[in-house]
Image: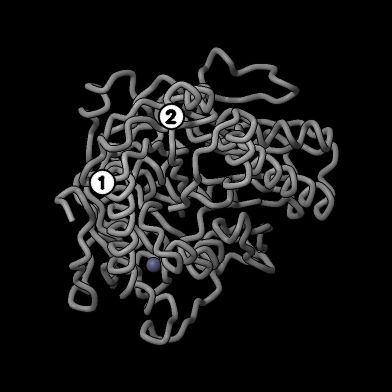
């Protein structure tokens, strides 16, 4: 294990006193899960040169599990070094598999909440793909808020309007039946303030908040060590999501998981009464999640060592290897590898990522077509949900490279 890798000598149970309070419940009792020193602050900002890629700002991660609400967060997180700018790119909509999932969610929301023809506000909308689905499938009007959007592209795209600003009280008069926030809450220094702001905007008691975030409990269960990234201050579990919704004035019937349990989502409605529901849970030691924290660093380390062994074997056999997917998981893995140079290229179907370089480790991102020129033997994939889609692309290019899901 090289010095770049994560540290599994976590101080579990011996370091229950965190000085950085939980961003969900303000609790200060927590247990340490894993430490990852010196990781790139941004996985989702690709660079224009190897030199620029290697010179990126780095930060430290120490994940802890809150004793009171089961929230997982990075207690070394420093919001001062995170500033989202144009160039931040984490759209998944180039994937057909993902687009199908997104369309199914929109169809479900349109039907179950009768949102046809209604106003939709998407906070942290990226390039607005989710809003476009509402416009196309439900004849809805959409307003998106995205601070990293190019201000020149604010107006009139497919019947939706994107504002390159954060959502504040200045925008409360925009009529909306549905507020959306997908994959935003986990990035924020103050998620409670964010949800309270949305709650204040919801003057219509029948309005809906659709919230979707990565599933922190699933990350623990699967030992998904490469899902731990600096951009994510928070890793919500069903319990901590329940806690924060109760605290910020929402009611809901069920927290659900989707996309192969990788995401948590909830349809939440404004609650009339102001007082927060008293949150009760059994002692932490009885919690299944708590037991998983004891194993996370160790099983994550074992998983990583297996990958190192696999790469060493492939290298020994003279096989040309590439990684598929210049997203968070791939960037994190490449930055943890002892011999990151053994993988020269990263494939991504998003044209906006091609020709750029992986932050930290510095691999060039190429198109799938590029593989025909280098005749890769092995394609490593980071998320098995995309296996079929990736196999189809390889088949269409007559490439016989074998897929290995890491
Ligand atoms: Zn907490």
Q: Where ligand 1 lies, by quadrant?
A: bottom left
> Seen from this angle, which residue lies furthest left?
3
Name the foreground residue: 225 vs 317.
317
Name the element at disc 2: loop
Residue 383 versus residue 405: which sits nearer the camera?
Answer: 405
Which residue corresponds to the image point at 73% horizontal and 54% vertical from the top-left?
205
Q: Which mark is residue 88?
A: 2
Question: Up-down: is 248 above or below 69?
Answer: above
Residue 267 rendering spot, x and y as whole percentages? 68, 57
Query: In front here: 356 or 393?
Result: 393
User: Which corner quadrant holds the N terminus?
Assistant: bottom left
- Dividing the picture into quadrants, the one containing residue 171 is top right
Residue 146 shown left or right of residue 22 in the figure? right
Q: Is residue 192 left or right of residue 18?
A: right
Q: In this rendering, would 107 be left or right of 164?
A: right
The tag earlier along the polypeptide, 1 or 2, is 2
Q: Assess mark 2: CB under 8 A from ligand 1?
A: no
Q: Position of residue 85 (x, y in %)?
A: 40, 26
User: Quick one: SS at disc 1?
Assistant: loop
Query: Measured from the top left, where is residue 226 in percent x and y?
Result: 37, 52
Seen in the picture, residue 200 relative to 358 is either above or below; the reply is below
- Name the spot of residue 403 as percent of width and height, x first: 50, 46
The residue drawn where x is 32% and y is 59% is 306
> Does the beta carbon of the residue at mark 1 sit less than 8 Å from ligand 1?
no
Badge count: 2
Which mark is in front, 1 or 2?
1
Residue designated by label 1: 337
Residue located farthest toward the front when viewing the structure as drawn: 317
């Amino acid at each position: 294990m090289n010095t770049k890798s994560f540290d599994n000598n976590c101080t579990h149970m011996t370091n229950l006193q965190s000085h950085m309070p939980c961003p969900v419940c303000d609790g200060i009792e927590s247990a340490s899960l894993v430490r990852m020193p010196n990781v790139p602050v941004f996985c989702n900002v690709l660079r224009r040169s190897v030199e620029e890629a290697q010179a990126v700002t780095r930060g430290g991660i120490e994940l802890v599990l809150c004793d009171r609400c089961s929230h997982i967060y990075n207690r070394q997180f420093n919001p001062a070094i995170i500033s989202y700018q144009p160039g931040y790119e984490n759209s998944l909509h180039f994937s057909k598999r993902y687009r199908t999932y997104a369309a199914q969610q929109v169809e479900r929301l349109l039907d179950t909440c009768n949102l046809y023809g209604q106003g939709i506000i998407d906070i942290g909308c990226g390039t607005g793909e989710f809003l476009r689905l509402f416009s196309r499938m439900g004849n809805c009007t959409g307003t998106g808020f995205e601070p990293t959007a190019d201000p020149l592209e604010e107006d009139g795209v497919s019947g939706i309007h994107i504002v390159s600003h954060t959502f504040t009280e200045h925008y409360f008069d925009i009529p909306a039946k549905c507020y959306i926030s997908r994959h935003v809450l986990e990035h924020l220094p103050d998620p409670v303030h964010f949800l309270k702001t949305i709650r204040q905007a919801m003057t219509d008691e029948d309005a809906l908040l659709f919230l979707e975030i990565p599933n922190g409990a699933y990350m623990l269960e699967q030992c998904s060590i490469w899902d731990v990234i600096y951009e994510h201050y928070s890793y919500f579990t069903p319990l901590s999501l329940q806690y924060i919704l109760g605290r910020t004035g929402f009611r809901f019937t069920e927290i659900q998981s989707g996309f192969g349990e990788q995401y948590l989502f909830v349809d939440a409605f404004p609650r009339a009464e102001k007082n927060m529901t008293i949150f009760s849970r059994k002692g932490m030691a009885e919690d299944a999640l708590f037991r998983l924290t004891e194993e996370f660093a160790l099983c994550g380390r074992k998983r990583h060592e297996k990958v190192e062994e696999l790469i060493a074997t492939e290298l020994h056999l003279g096989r040309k290897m590439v990684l598929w997917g210049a997203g968070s998981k791939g960037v994190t893995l490449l930055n943890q590898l002892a011999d990151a140079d053994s993988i020269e290229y990263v494939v991504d179907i998003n044209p906006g990522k091609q020709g750029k370089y992986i932050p930290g480790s510095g691999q060039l991102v190429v198109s799938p077509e590029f593989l025909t020129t280098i005749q890769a033997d092995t394609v490593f994939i980071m998320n098995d949900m995309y296996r079929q889609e990736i196999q189809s692309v390889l088949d269409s290019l007559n490439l016989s490279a074998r897929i290995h899901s890491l």
